[in-house]
Every structure is written in C-alpha cells, then in structure tokens.
Image (tube, helix red, strand yellow):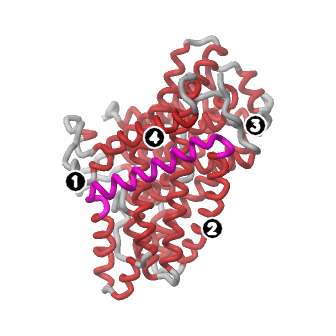
C-alpha cells in the first residue's frame, strides 16, 4: 500500500492531533452544549467521559493507525487479517471516513460564520455597542448573526471559501501541507485565548460564570422536565456529554487513526495521546471561562444554542480597548483552528482515494472537497430556505431537527460513540495481546497498561453502550 510520509517529530504529531481535536468543537460547541444542559453537571460528566472513555479510545485509535500505516479502511482490513478475523472489520474504517465526511459538511458552514465575522469585526461594526443602552446590545449583536445565517447566498459563499482553502492544505501532503498548517495555528490560538480570559476576568459576572461551569446540580441535569407533581428522567445530557467528548477529541471519525499512520515508529503513543487530550480539554474549559462571564455580564442566556459564540464574544470585542484588533485576530484564529480540524476530517477519505491507485493526492483532494461542498449545501439551507424542513420528523427523536441538526446529532451522538465501542472491542478483545504491548512499548505488568486495558475492555464498551441504548429509548 502507498504511504504518504510521516510527521517530522513527535511534537509535530502532538500539534497535528491537537489541531484535529481543538477547533470549533471546543470553542463553538462545548460552551453552547454546556449552556443547554445546565452547566456544572454537564462539565463534570464530560470530563469523566474524556478520562474514562476518550483517552483510552484515542490511544487505541492512534495504535491502530500506527500499526496499519494506511487509511482507516485499509488499516482495519490489514489488522483484521493479521488478527485472523473477517475483513468486514474494514466497515469500521468506512464508518470513520463517512462520519468525518458528514461532520465536515456542516462544520465548514459554521467555520464560514467565523470567516464572515472577520471583516465585520475588523471594520468596527461591534464598537457601536459602546453607545447603546445595555438592554439593546444583545438584540443588535443578535441581528447581525441572524442577518448572516438567513442569507443563503452569503452562507454558501463562505462555505465554499472554507472548503477551497481546506483542499489546498490537504493537497500539500503530510509535512508540506498538514504539518506546516498546524505549527502556527495552535500556539497562536492559545495566546489569544489567554488574552480573552484576562478580559473575561475583568467582567462583573466572572464569578457567576465560574459557578455556572463548576457548581454541580445533577437533579436538573438528569431530570430537566420537573414539575411540582412529577419529575421525568432524561438521558439526553449523558448522551450529549459523551458525544461531545468523542466529537471534541476527533474520535471515531478516522482522523486520529490516519494521523497515527504518519506517526514515527518509536514515538510514545501513551505520552503523545495524553498531551493531546490535556490540551484539548484545557481549550474547552478556557472557552467556557471566557464566554459565560460575558454571557451573564450582558444579560444573555447561556442556553442560546449554536449561535452562542457569535452573539457573546462580539459584545466583548465591541467594549474592550483595541477590541476590533483582538476580535479580528480571534475570528482569524478560530477559522485557523477550524481548518486544522477540517484537514483531519477529510484526510481519511483522501488517503483512501490515493490508495486505490486511481487518484493523485491533488485529484483526490479536489473530488473529496467537491463532495463535501455539495452535502454542505443541506446545512447552508437549513438556516434559511429549508429552515422548516425536518426530514425525519416522523420519529419523535428527530421531529424538530433540520438537516444541520440531524447530521450533527447522527454523527456526534451515534456514529462516533459506536465507532469508539467497536475500536475498543477490536483492540482489547481481538488483537493479539503481544502486538498491542509491542505497539505501546510497554509490558503486561505495567500498571498504566493494565488500567488502560481494563478501561478499554470493560468501561468504554459498557458505558458507551448503556448511554447509547438509553438514547434510542430502550430503557424508556
């Protein structure tokens, strides 16, 4: 099979995998999911999912890629053959490729919002909030966001621009495109996040934001529909926290597996994975600590949904010194973070097309980008022309979901966790134990290995399985 090169160093892999994980999932999705599911309880369940399921599965996925040295589809075929099992296991590789493909189709639409905000912030649009009464600020900023998403032509143009740049980076190859892109993006994003955290600490409701994120109320989390007469159990928050853990870490979508295929042979899987998970989790927490104080300081609602980041941070940029400069820089770097994730989402499909022998890397990138762009039109129109279209409304779980909502739900809450289950089963139950030990460069009596193997063998499949079964109504 054809190889594509490898990362120049362990640090390059950490930056690339962190770039894959850190993106809109942390800065856009984590805050609004935390807001929708009540704050602290969601955060603690999310962190538990990251530690008990996300980290073990990421190590397993990196190891599968490092051992297979191919696209997820062919890596799973090779590894199943090596273990003496059916080549149907390559379906797991296909599932990851398709999930990444679908996620990018709507991810690029949200990334387009970030691109659209760059000129808006740069020209000082949001500085007008300094001259407004407090009770009018939220409405003004919200109208700018609504004006963007309700215009299909503007959304389509930004969606197209994001996809084109993504494909240019992917076409450059491993070191020339992927690695070069993330070496700048990730350090710069951390710097800007720390600057914004400093601003959030100066807001009057910073402590309220802290309490919202870290005060734990499991009753409202597990029983969100309580009335004076009765309380109705709901596992939606559990499923959302688990799905967010997998989404944020880029698990189950082939990205981490294909990046693992480019990992230098003697790089430590455990150390590199732990570094990536720590950085990813830190960015998510920082994003929450930045956004929620601004939300409460301006009388906004934390459960504002998908537009939360685009309705809160512009208020801060409009009021802070040199806000237009920092705001422009933030949305530029948000777009760059989105690109670092986007290139990992499409890389599995590009790698597979190259392996067929029928495509060059350039033509594979163009074809993949065109297909993602076409599917993304469904999400573009979900906010305007087709906002009333609910394709699976005959099912109660999906009755209020547009194409955008549906693709987000199916990938994050179903495809990624299921992919995680089957990767855990394959590595912990089917692969030869000595191969796993050799790839991890450890020993069978190492305490870290034994904990990881136990989590992967029992905790991950059972935990993900129970939450998933509850989500589809088995326990209702």
Contact check, label 2 and label 4, Cβ < 8 Å: no
Q: CA distance from mark 1 to mark 4?
A: 53 Å
Q: Is residue 263 above or below residue 288?
A: above
Where does the image place residue 33, in percent across and percent down from the top left?
41, 55
Of marks 3 and 4, the one in the foreground:
4
Where does the image place residue 418, in percent across and percent down from the top left?
47, 31
Indicate the secondary structure of the residue bearing disc 3: loop
Indicate the secondary structure of the residue bearing disc 1: loop
Q: Is residue 388 above or below residue 427?
A: below
Counting residues from the start of the chain, the first of labels 1 and 3 encountered is: 1
Front-lying residue, 291 or 4: 4
Answer whether residue 14 is visible to the viewer in this image. Answer: yes
Give the overall secondary structure of the magenta segment: helix
Counting residues from the start of the chain, the first of labels 2 and 4 encountered is: 2
- Label 3 sits on residue: 264
Counting residues from the start of the chain, the first of labels 1 and 2 encountered is: 2
Residue stretch rendered in magenta on the structure = 148-176
- Label 1 sits on residue: 229
The crowding category of the residue bearing disc 3, from other C-alpha atoms within 10 Å (few below 14, some 14 to 19, many at least 20), is some
Indicate the secondary structure of the residue bearing disc 4: helix
Q: Which mark is residue 209?
A: none
Indicate the secondary structure of the residue bearing disc 2: helix
- Label 2 sits on residue: 191
Counting residues from the start of the chain, the first of labels 1 and 4 encountered is: 1
Magenta highlight on residue 150: yes
Of marks 1 and 2, the one in the foreground:
2
The crowding category of the residue bearing disc 4, from other C-alpha atoms within 10 Å (few below 14, some 14 to 19, many at least 20), is many
Magenta highlight on residue 103: no
Residue sitting at x 41%, y 76%: 315
Q: CA distance from mark 1 to mark 3?
A: 60 Å
Answer whether residue 453 is visible to the viewer in this image. Answer: no
């Amino acid at each position: 099979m054809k190889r594509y090169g490898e990362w120049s160093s362990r640090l390059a892999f950490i930056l690339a995998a962190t770039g894959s994980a850190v993106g809109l999932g942390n800065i856009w999705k984590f805050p609004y999911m935390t807001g929708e599911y009540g704050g602290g309880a969601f955060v603690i369940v999310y962190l538990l999912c990251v530690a008990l399921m996300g980290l073990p599965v990421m190590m397993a996925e990196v190891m599968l890629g490092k051992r297979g040295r191919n696209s997820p589809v062919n890596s799973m075929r090779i590894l199943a053959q090596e273990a003496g099992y059916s080549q149907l296991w390559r379906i797991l590789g296909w599932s990851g490729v398709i999930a990444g493909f679908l996620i990018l189709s709507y991810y690029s639409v949200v990334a387009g919002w970030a691109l659209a905000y760059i000129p808006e912030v740069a020209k000082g649009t949001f500085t007008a909030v300094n001259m407004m009464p407090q009770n009018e600020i939220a409405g003004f900023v919200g109208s700018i966001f609504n004006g963007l998403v309700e215009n299909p032509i503007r959304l389509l143009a930004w969606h197209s621009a994001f996809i084109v740049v993504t494909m240019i980076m992917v076409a450059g190859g491993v070191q020339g495109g992927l690695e070069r892109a993330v070496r700048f993006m990730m350090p710069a994003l951390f710097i800007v996040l720390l600057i914004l955290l400093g601003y959030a600490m100066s807001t009057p409701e910073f402590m309220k934001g802290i309490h919202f994120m870290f005060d734990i109320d499991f009753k409202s989390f597990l029983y969100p529909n309580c009335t004076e007469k009765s309380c109705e159990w709901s596992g939606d928050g559990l499923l959302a926290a688990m799905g967010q853990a997998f989404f944020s870490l880029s698990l189950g979508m082939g990205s981490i597996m294909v990046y693992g295929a480019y990992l230098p042979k003697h790089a430590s899987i455990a150390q590199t994975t732990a570094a990536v998970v720590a950085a990813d989790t830190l960015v998510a927490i920082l994003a929450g600590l930045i956004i929620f104080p601004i939300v409460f300081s301006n009388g906004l609602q934390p459960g504002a949904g998908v537009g939360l980041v685009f309705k809160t941070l512009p208020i801060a940029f409009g009021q802070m010194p040199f806000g237009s400069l920092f705001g422009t820089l933030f949305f530029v770097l948000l777009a760059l973070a989105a690109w670092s994730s986007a290139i990992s989402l499409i890389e599995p499909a590009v790698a597979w097309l190259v392996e067929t022998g029928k495509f060059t890397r350039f033509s594979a990138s163009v074809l993949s980008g065109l297909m993602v762009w076409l599917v993304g039109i469904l999400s573009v129109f979900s906010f305007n022309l087709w906002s009333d279209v609910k394709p699976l409304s005959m099912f109660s779980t999906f009755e209020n979901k547009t194409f955008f909502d549906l693709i987000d739900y199916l990938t994050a809450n179903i495809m990624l966790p299921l992919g995680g289950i089957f990767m855990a089963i394959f590595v912990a139950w089917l692969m030869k134990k000595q191969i796993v030990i050799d790839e991890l460069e450890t020993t069978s009596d190492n305490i870290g290995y034994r904990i990881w193997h136990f989590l992967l063998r029992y905790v991950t499949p059972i935990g993900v399985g129970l939450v998933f079964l509850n989500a589809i109504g088995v326990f209702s």
